[in-house]
Amino acid sequence: MTERKPRKDATRNRAAALAAADELFSHGGSAEDVTMADIAAAAGVGKGTLFRAFGDRTGLIRALYAARLQPLTEAVEAGPPPLGPGTPPLERVPALLDALLCFKLDNRHLALALEGTGADSPYRTEHYEQWHTLVRELLHRIPGAADGDFTAHALLAATRADLVEHLAGTEHASREDLRAQLAHHVARVLGVA
């Protein structure tokens, strides 16, 4: 059976909705204040179109987050060092965490919206599972590294959107300071400080 391609207007409406949501989340006040009606109006589509395309608000946020995360995911899966698979684990773990921190800094509004959906635990999302599995597996390949499962969770916690927002938004820590502090923390955890 041949897979049906989405109609051109459906593809266009989806792209418009994602762009409108991104704009509203990045320039609005609180992510909770952005509604499906707001997104539909900004995209020039009906609310029903959004619900058909994404299921609900959380589905729309997940789709937008996944689209933004795709380049990083591709770099991790097949890219060159330091993120790519050919990098030794002791170098790759800090590079992965730095890349995630930079992604969260660049996409704070979206990451906060996703983590704040309340629909599910952020630890049960597909992207978190992928990062956790990768970091855990890399830790298992580092001689003398602490328990991979817990340590992977603890290291990834340093890149949670709410913490990044608190440090960068509330405490006004600079990007460079946050990256340096994370690098120092990871080095201590891995025993290379």
Image: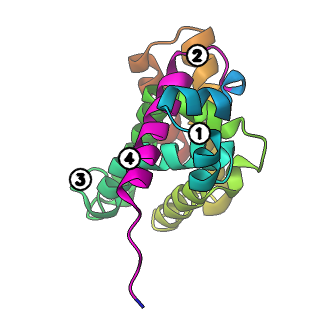
From the top left corner, tell me how far across and down residue 94 is, in percent: 41, 44
The residue that mark 1 highlights is: 46
Q: Secondary structure at mark 1?
A: loop
Numbered badge on residue 81: 3
Is 131 placed left or right of 124 in the picture? left
Image depth: mark 3 or mark 4 in front: 4
Q: Secondary structure at mark 2?
A: loop
Q: CA distance from mark 1 to mark 4?
A: 13 Å
Q: Residue at x 52, y 49 (%)?
A: 63
Q: Is residue 16 magenta?
A: yes
From the top left corner, tell me how far across and down residue 85 is, in percent: 31, 64
Numbered badge on residue 141: none
Give whichever of discs 1 and 2 has the lower sequence position.
2
What amino acid type is highlighted by mark number 4?
Arg
The span shown in magenta is 2-31
Q: Quadrant of the C terminus?
A: top left
